[in-house]
Image (cartoon, rainbow, N blue to C red):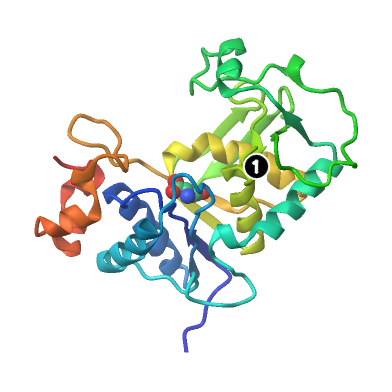
């Protein structure tokens, strides 16, 4: 019998396109780290964005990752106390989290468009090119106890204006961000009726007792935002490992739009998973 340790990792693909070599590499690292620690790896499908997610991509992701050699111990096929493992089936849990944050006065409904926020943002100069939501647009702290459902509004997190956020990344070393400078009030709930990525992922990582998150470096600033949500729920955050991104021969990071790097395409062109994993280009992509 396999004895699992308390290490719990996860891979969390979104079925918005075919997975590419960059996803495979991040997930491979997640799997290796979990195996090294005799941990449990969870497969969670992040399918909340109904406009972009497709069933065919969800089937393809599982098929392609299995072909590539990824293995996980918990996922959509299993039923246990940590599931369901598809975010679209977890709405009651997110609604409860929204309600908690609302009653704590930590979030507020907002009707500003993304375009107007970009325009008003004084701080486009910051390193991440993140528009900062102007604090003057925030409603004063009235209570929203009478609002029973979030729908119809974007809800934003009231980000402290100058809070230092530190974490020790297992790949990058010490990381530091300043809330209100590196990022501003971010989305918690979307007006089309679903939780934001930041909320859903934190709620799930807490509920699924994830002890380390392995994700791409492109999500570094999201990690900083998410640490504020852990604080809001008074929960200890998991550890983090941000993997460097795979780029193409021009140094541009891979996206789901680049068909040539999709695992299915590579398989069609005759690559084997062993060959892909052995190649020096594993770290940089190839074209
Ligand atoms: N679902 C996200 C993605 O495909 C990753 C989520 C995460 O690692 O937090 O980019």
Q: Is residue 73 above or below residue 51?
A: below
Please indicate whether residue 33 sits to the left or right of residue 159 in the image.
Answer: left
Please indicate whether residue 240 sits to the left or right of residue 81 in the image.
Answer: left
Q: Is residue 64 above or below residue 201?
A: below
Residue 244 on image: x %, y %: 36, 41
Residue 84 occupies which quadrant of the picture? bottom right
Q: Residue at x 68, y 16 (%)?
A: 134
Please indicate whether residue 39 sits to the left or right of residue 60 in the image.
Answer: right
Residue 43 on image: x %, y %: 47, 64
Q: Residue at x 24, y 40 (%)?
A: 258
Q: Residue at x 50, y 72 (%)?
A: 74
Residue 126 on image: x %, y %: 52, 17
- Considering every residue shown, the one lying at the far bottom of the view is 1
On the question of residue 158 being in view, the answer is no
- Quick one: quadrant of the C terminus? top left
Q: Is residue 183 above or below residue 201?
A: above
Helix, strand, or loop for circle 1?
A: helix
- Residue annotated with mark 1: 227
Q: Residue at x 55, y 38 (%)?
A: 222
Please indicate whether residue 125 sits to the left or right of residue 150 in the image.
Answer: left
Residue 52 on image: x %, y %: 44, 45
On the question of residue 121 being in view, the answer is yes
Dot 1: within a 10 Å radius of its alpha carbon, few (fewer than 14), some, or many (20 or more) residues? many
Using the image as rendered, state which of residue 52 and residue 254 is in the foreground. Answer: 52
Q: Is residue 57 above or below residue 112?
A: below
Residue 211 occupies which quadrant of the picture? bottom right
């Amino acid at each position: 019998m396999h004895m699992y340790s308390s290490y719990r990792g996860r891979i969390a693909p979104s079925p918005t396109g075919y997975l590419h070599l960059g996803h495979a590499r991040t997930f491979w690292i997640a799997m290796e780290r979990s195996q090294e620690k005799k941990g449990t790896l969870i497969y969670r499908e992040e399918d909340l964005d109904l406009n972009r997610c497709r069933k065919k991509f969800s089937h393809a992701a599982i098929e392609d990752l299995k072909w590539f050699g990824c293995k996980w111990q918990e996922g959509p096929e299993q039923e246990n106390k940590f599931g369901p493992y598809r975010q679209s089936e977890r709405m009651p849990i997110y609604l409860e989290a929204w309600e908690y944050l609302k009653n704590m006065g930590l979030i507020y409904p907002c009707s500003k468009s993304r375009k107007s926020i970009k325009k008003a943002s004084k701080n486009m100069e910051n390193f991440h090119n993140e528009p900062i939501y102007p604090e003057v647009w925030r409603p004063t702290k009235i209570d929203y106890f009478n609002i029973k459902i979030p729908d119809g509004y974007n809800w934003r997190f009231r980000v402290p204006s100058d809070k230092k956020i530190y974490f020790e990344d297992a790949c990058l070393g010490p990381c530091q961000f300043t809330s209100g400078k590196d990022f501003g009030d971010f989305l918690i709930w979307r007006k089309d009726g679903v939780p934001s990525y930041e909320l859903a992922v934190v709620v799930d990582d807490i509920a699924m007792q994830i002890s380390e998150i392995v994700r791409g470096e492109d999500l570094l600033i999201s990690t900083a935002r998410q640490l504020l949500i852990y604080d809001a729920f008074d929960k200890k955050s998991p550890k983090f490992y941000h993997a460097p991104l795979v780029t193409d021969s021009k140094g541009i990071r891979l996206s789901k739009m680049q068909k040539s790097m999709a695992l299915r395409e590579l398989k069609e062109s005759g690559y084997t998973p062993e060959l892909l994993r052995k190649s020096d280009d594993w770290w940089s992509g190839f074209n």
